[in-house]
Image: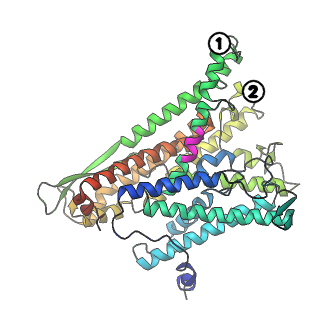
Amino acid sequence: MGWKEAAEPVLTRMPAVRRPEGHVPFKRKLMWTVGILMLYFFLTNISLLGFQSGGADDLFGQFRAILAGSHGSVLQVGIGPIVTASIVLQLLGGANLLGLDTDDPRDQVLYQGLQKLLVVMMVILTGLPMVFAGGFLPAVPQLQLGGLTLDQTQVQMLMFAQIIVGGILILYMDEVVSKWGVGSGIGLFIIAGVSQRLVSGLVNPVQGGFFFDWYRILTGQVDVGSLVSGAGLQTLLLGEGHIIALFTTVLIFGIVVYAESVRVEIPLSHARVKGARGRFPVKLIYASVLPMILVRAVQANIQFMGQILNSQWAGMPSWLGTYSSQGQPTGGFFYYVAPIYSPDDWMWITANVAQEWWQVMIRIGIDVTFMVVGGAIFAIFWVETTDMGPESTAKQIQNSGMQIPGFRQNVGVIEKVMERYIPQVTVIGGALVGLLAVWANMLGTIGGVSGTGLLLAVSITYKLYEEIAEEQMMEMHPMMRDMFGGGD
């Protein structure tokens, strides 16, 4: 008996959101999307019952824009378990260890059930050390709940149960958006988190928003000294002036929008309908920016492991990692593999860099290599597992009745043409996105949004705009919906 036969009774019984029967009107899709977004914001503002606020810092603080959720809330783990489960499945599928054919309806059910089971396991594995190890989510010593008095251990168990519920909720919220809404839930939650931090970075009067800081500079409340002095220049560029952060944020917006429009268009013509022509676009960022979530998730899990070891292993060797009182790596393996989060991590002008220049350069080199190589590798995995590769694309074109002018109407011929473009563009696009993410982190962004988070937000918003435009076009012209397979 193979693993599929043994696991089928469990995997086929995993709860799933029912797919819509027939076409879902655009207004209803929009309603579902907005409803899930409001529920997401609501859940991020519900604190864990028993959580002692003002305790330890967020373990995923530097990655929070990517992993979504909110520290100390029901959505503590965010989309992290979903992303980690996707990485595991992509690696297993890429090595052909699962033996699942996604074109087979039975195997599709098994794959989706396996993904949900892995997500639940990742929620448990992520939540356990957060609650029970190192005080990362400190619990109140005692809690009155109705007529019961819970001690600290019982409160921790209650918090852990809430984290599991939150992790499962965000899994099904993502599934609702994917099947009934516009875009994907993961993308929606990332946009929500990044947008919130961007707006806060612009107009927050308490934590130093861009507009309020410049008001204080112009009214003399902030002493920038002489503009040519080190202190004054540092204040304007990296401090209250936010000049570099604003420049980086605007430039990233422009580069991503431009890169999304750069494409190689392969001409197509209909085999039976004379005069019916079209184009298949191979974009520069063909695999989208979403594979960057997978790369950063790997880094987040490595840093999470280091934090756990540091809190539980009193005699951890210095070569493995040394940590500051704030829980940040300052030396050893975990320091060198930590991403560059902001200018403070490498710019000596900020006077916050405690490491030698060569240590910082090694860290930058590892981060750039990890993001560029990892971006290219995960982009290839993404293209193959989402049916965007040459073979899948050739089948889709063939099934739609289209062909490439000047070539025989044959799947193999179309696949060879696609192989000239898709693999190369996928690697180049993935590496480019990784390089942009590191560069944005090094220079900083408005609101402290990570470079990856900003890239994701801009790219996902752009694609969401395209999808909304396509949905509206199909609402206006139902015949086009039938041509693209969206009919009842």
* Disc assigned to residue 351: 2
Quadrant of the rendering where the N terminus is positioned: bottom right
Residue that appears at 39% across and 73% down: 103
Camera-side residue of 299 and 133: 133
Q: Amino acid at mark 1?
A: Leu
Q: As drawn, is 192 to the left or to the right of 312?
A: left
Residue annotated with mark 1: 227
Occupied quadrant, residue 451 = top right
Q: As drawn, is 427 to the left or to the right of 118?
A: left
Q: How many dots with numbers? A: 2
Q: As drawn, is 441 to the left or to the right of 29?
A: right
Please give the range of residues in magenta.
192-197
Q: Residue 180 placed where, x, y %?
A: 43, 62
Q: Is residue 445 visible?
A: no
Camera-side residue of 13 and 233: 13
Residue that appears at 54% across and 74% down: 15
Q: Is residue 47 visible?
A: yes
Question: What kind of element bears circle 2?
Answer: loop
In the displayed image of the protein, which residue is found farthest to the left?
Answer: 274
Residue that appears at 34% across and 51% down: 421
Q: Residue 289 placed where, x, y %?
A: 48, 48
Camera-side residue of 318 and 290: 290
Real-space Cα separation, disc 2 to disc 1, in angstroms: 18 Å
Q: Amino acid at mark 2?
A: Ala
Question: What kind of element bears circle 1?
Answer: loop
Quadrant of the rendering where the C terminus is positioned: bottom left
Residue that appears at 61% across and 53% down: 42
